[in-house]
Amino acid sequence: MMMQGLRLLLPIALFAGLVGFWEWAVVRWQVPPFILPSPGAILTVFETDGASLLGSAWITLGTTLAAFVLAVISGMALAVLFASSRLAEAALSPYAVTLQVTPVVAIAPLIIVWVGLDNAWLAVLILAWIVAFFPVLASATAGLKAVDPNLRDLFRLYRAGFRQTFLRLMIPSSLPYLLAGIKTAGGLALVGAVVAEFAAASGNTDGLAWRILEAGNRLQIAKMFAALLLLALMGVVLYAILSFVEWLLLHRWHGDRRRA
Amino acid sequence: MSGDLRLDRLAKTFPNGTAALEELSADIAAGAFVSLLGPSGCGKSTVLRLIAGLEEPTRGRVDWPQTRGSLGFIFQEPTLMAWASAAKNAALPLELAGAPRSEAHARACAALAKVGLEGFANALPRELSGGMRMRVSIARALVAEPEVLLMDEPFAALDEFTRSKLNDDLLRLWAERRFTGIFVTHSVFEAVYLSQRILILSGRPGRLIADIENPAPYPRASGYRTSPEFNATAREILKALEDRAA
């Protein structure tokens, strides 16, 4: 209990201390604002450019969530295909791995050419999806393979259909694996979306990454910090929500394993 | 009772070339309690899997009209769904057969009560002890009132006390329901205590080397374990195993 309180309190105290020191240091050594703006200056950016920043954040968040949902659905679907057909797995998994290990920034220009700069948002979506897709596929495949063979036999013995076996056995068995992969995918979808926005590097995407590039070109360092802050916040909230969903689904039969 | 179970020159060779079972013929009367006894790797489990239809025989056949729910199977491990309550686990055969949820639940609770787990319907497997988990597994195997119950060394992983308690409970359930019980074990004493008949298999590939009747009447109280009759049957089995080894 004591440990848990500290776990929450320590980061907050450290954060307050650091911000305080930062504010003090900027004034004390008269750091020019185009190198390091004070926390106060960053906050004022939200007053002056709040609307445009939030609008961009909204766009990046939308792409991230769309890519995330696509990644979860397609990753699971392909994992089910792999689990039901060794042939399909042998044929397709090298491509999935190749797509995963090829740096997404390198693929970006090609995708952008293909979909056209007018549809830059689509390119960003595709790239974010590529990044987020693999952890779902890998974890779901591992989960589906980890089904207890005796339980599988039992389902066969009682002549369960594919639907019954899938819903009552495969999904629940693989859930802990799947959720770990989904949690990773959430963070990666955001990374992918931002990287893709940088790669597209045009006002057509209008996401937070574009705001950061734009502000950087104009030496509006405080605005860069503000955009970064929004991105970090987005990532943390996404992770927190996914962790909570994981806890909600697993804590009764799985979560306490750590203690056991 | 829908009739006897006939194993007709049953043989199994796995695709990798391992001969698990050479040739096994036996008629098992409906309602009998029979043990398959033999060293590890003698194809005992394979016999059960062949009867259950989980494996196809290379030669020979199993003569018994298996229908949905007419067969129960208890594995060496409890083999429960970790995410489902005891009642949900026990209700599985009924729910897979499409029984209404409330009916399945009621029958599962009754089956749990039969194995001494009243009040544990909502418990998850991880909240139960090893012996209790095995009881849930027994309740699940019996919930659909099968005609044949196949047991693959179900108590091998349990401690001696739990094991002998579960042996007694199993015999009580058998006396009530009169299913055909086929019990795989490598314990001579467990086989003698439980069965009317003991089929002894040789090591790999499995072959029938002795077919021993155990005439001791039921119910068999714990005194039976130390009785001269128990000893006589155990000696007969050990001799058959020794003759084989010589």
Image (spheres, helix red, strand yellow):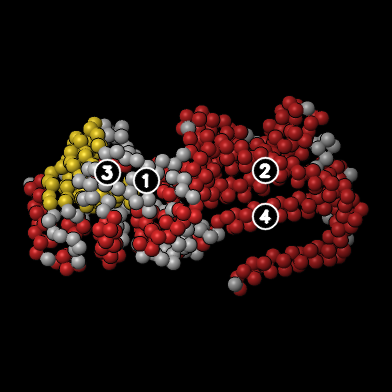
Q: Nearer the viewer, residue A193 or A39?
A: A193
For disc 2, the marked residue is: A68
Q: Amino acid at mark 3?
A: Ser
Which comes before the other along the chain, label 2 or label 4? 2
- At 17% from the left and 53% from the top, the residue drawn is B196
For disc 4, the marked residue is: A241
Q: Amino acid at mark 2?
A: Phe
Check disc 3 and report its element: helix, strand or loop.
loop
- At 50% from the left and 52% from the top, the residue drawn is B101
In space, the residues marked 4 and 3 are separated at their CA atoms by 56 Å
Determine whether A71 is above or below A46 in the image: above
Which comes before the other along the chain, label 3 or label 1? 3
Picture coordinates of residue B44 (x, y %)? 24, 45
Q: Nearer the viewer, residue B196 or A147?
A: B196
For discs 4 and 3, the disc positioned in front in the rendered view: 3
Check disc 1 and report its element: helix, strand or loop.
loop
Check disc 4 and report its element: helix, strand or loop.
helix
In space, the residues marked 2 and 1 are separated at their CA atoms by 43 Å
Question: Is A39 placed left or right of B150 in the picture?
Answer: right
Give the chain letter at badge 1: B
Mark 3 and mark 1 on one chain: yes
For disc 3, the marked residue is: B2
- At 13% from the left and 44% from the top, the residue drawn is B209
Picture coordinates of residue A260 (x, y %)? 47, 64
For disc 1, the marked residue is: B69
